[in-house]
Image: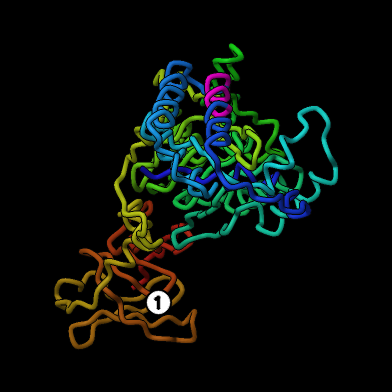
Amino acid sequence: MKKISLFLLMIPFACMAQETRPAAVEPMTLELTKVVVDTLSKALIANYVFTDKAQLMSNYLHAQLAKGAYRAIKDPQAFAVQISADLQTACPDLHMGFHFDPRLAQMGPPPMHAPNPHQDSLRNVFMEARNFAFTASEILPGNVGYVKFNGFVDVTPSAKETVTAAFRFVRYTKALIIDLRENHGGSPLMVKQVESYFFADKTRVNDIITPNKHDTTKGWTDPTATDGLILQMPVYILTSSSTVSAAEDFTYGMQMAKRATIAGEKTAGGAHPTGPVFLGHGFVAGIPFARSYNIHTGTDWEGTGVIPDIVLKADASLDEVNSTLFPNSWFANQQKAVDQPVEPSAVQAYLGTYEGGLKFYTKEHALYCENPERGNQVFKLRYISPGFFQLDENVQVKFGQQQGSASGMQFYWSDGNISFKQKIQ
């Protein structure tokens, strides 16, 4: 079973750990092995989201210990790998992790009520250098927006500024594709921040239930947190089997609120928020302490993943994505356009001069246009469907159209605009 990396979880600590001298590595002994298993078992029972499953994991680890499954393991890294495998055997959970990292573990847990400006600055510099996980914000043919980001980082002023700028750039597009195919999760708070751009009214999406604290954090979007930017175009979210955790939170919430169409592969299926528990002797456990809950479904995506509305391969190119999502779009029609012989009699009604001086004529079973607006340049039209042709790199034309009492053709521009050209003679 694929297991989530704790990379995003550990970013705040990894930035600080760079300044920390590595601790000496202890080899595993029978006594140390028992101490670690006992400590991990207590941590699971105290923190894991489901107490009954925590007990199952604890029982399994102690049974493995009793039968000598760890006796021959001296290397702490190998021991951590085996413990991780045993945890997944006892209770499959993509968010569960157990690691040996003495440099990180010697620091202990971060202070919960005493922010460290230096540590916050290090973390922010680390994420700034990676553009807060945003890798693309652009406009595709047909005036389709495209935004790609590979993680949900902490909501800091500079991160929020970057997120807002990425979505503001595509605010006038006719549809928006959000690419989460390589997004491995991160902050639930950033999930709510991003969701807020897509709802004009405060909207409830996914809650987080923390059983051990008898607490439920209701997941509401906040239109006041978007600097006035609310996006109302149709939204399509691209997913893969690697889309996981907070990325699934965003995808599932948008899908169940009927605000987005999901295209791609079924996602990984990890719905449990996770926190680090420092166990001593260089060991750190990532233990899921809460679960997600959607009011529309009464459940979440744990173990099942988010099911796409449109199936696409994870490695589909943007051209393939665009053509699949918008089969009648300008871009899709451009892909359909072919050089095809035309019978002069079949296009006779289209021939002549149109507004702007455009002249259409046939020659050697092909349809041509002489365009004085482009220096009398001549273009050979490519066939899309009856009466519908690709004129040049920017325009598709549909003949035989009416506007009031005027006859002519429609111009379909690559930016999504449509204009009418009246036939003059």
Residue 358: horizontal and vertical position, in percent?
Answer: 40, 77
What residue is disc 1 on?
A: 358
Q: Residues within 10 Å of mark 1 (few under 14, many from 20)?
A: some
* In the depicted structure, whether residue 356 falls above or below residue 60: below
Q: Which element carries disc 1, helix, strand or loop?
A: strand
Dot 1 amino acid type: Leu
Which quarter of the figure is the N terminus placed in? top left
Boundaries of the magenta span: 39-46
Q: Residue at x 58, y 11 (%)?
A: 214
Q: Residue at x 18, y 83 (%)?
A: 365
Left or right: residue 220 versus residue 59 is: right
User: Which quadrant of the structure image shows residue 339?
Assistant: bottom left
Q: Residue at x 55, y 29 (%)?
A: 40
Task: State how the image is colored.
Answer: rainbow
Q: Nearer the viewer, residue 173 or 138?
A: 138
Residue 204 visible (yes or no)? no
Q: Is residue 58 magenta?
A: no
Residue 391: horizontal and vertical position, in percent?
Answer: 36, 73
Q: Residue at x 36, y 79 (%)?
A: 359
Residue 222: horizontal and vertical position, in percent?
Answer: 65, 29
Left or right: residue 189 versus residue 207 is: right
Left or right: residue 107 versus residue 201 is: right
- Furthest residue to the top? 214
Residue 192: horizontal and vertical position, in percent?
Answer: 60, 33
Which quarter of the figure is the C terminus placed in? bottom left
The secondary structure that dominates the magenta segment is: helix
